[in-house]
Amino acid sequence: MKEFTYTITDPQGIHARPAGLLVKEAKKYASSLTIAKGSKKGDLKKIFTVMGLGVKQGESITVQADGADEEAAASAMETFFKENF
């Protein structure tokens, strides 16, 4: 399992448009991808889960990748967060 933590820098937090792109990117990988904020945790491949976390600027999220392509999935997700949030 691969894991990383990222602090959101976007003033709008994780909002609809980039969240949709994030889910689309996550679906490219066979690995199970989960996103967590505090005690809330869910499937990164589901838009309602991502939006339901209500992540604001300055808050940290943790992403876990577990599966056959976990290395590539975690790397791609971390890059996506750095470029979009």
Image: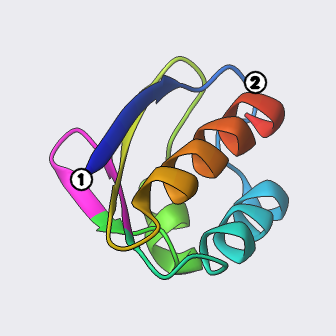
Viewer-closest of 30 and 11:
30
Q: Quadrant of residue 84?
A: top right
Magenta part, dominant SS: strand
Residue range highlighted in magenta? 33-41
Secondary structure under tag 2 reads: loop
- Quadrant location of the C terminus? top right
Q: What residue appears at the point 72 percent right and 52 percent down from the top-left corner?
A: 15
**Colouring scheme applied when the structure was drawn:** rainbow
Q: Is residue 38 magenta?
A: yes
Which badge, 1 or 2, comes first in the chain's sequence? 1
Q: Quadrant of residue 16?
A: bottom right
Secondary structure under tag 1 reads: loop
Percent position of residue 9, x then y: 68, 19
Which residue carries the number 2 mark? 11
Q: Quadrant of residue 61?
A: top left
Viewer-closest of 68 and 40:
68
Viewer-closest of 45 and 57:
45
Please state which amino acid type lies under the numbered disc 2: Pro
User: In the image, 34: left or right of 23?
Assistant: left
Please state which amino acid type lies under the numbered disc 1: Met
Q: What residue appears at the point 73 percent right and 76 percent down from the top-left corner?
A: 24
Q: Is residue 53 magenta?
A: no
Dot 1 crowding, Cα within 10 Å, few <14, some 14–19, many 20+: some
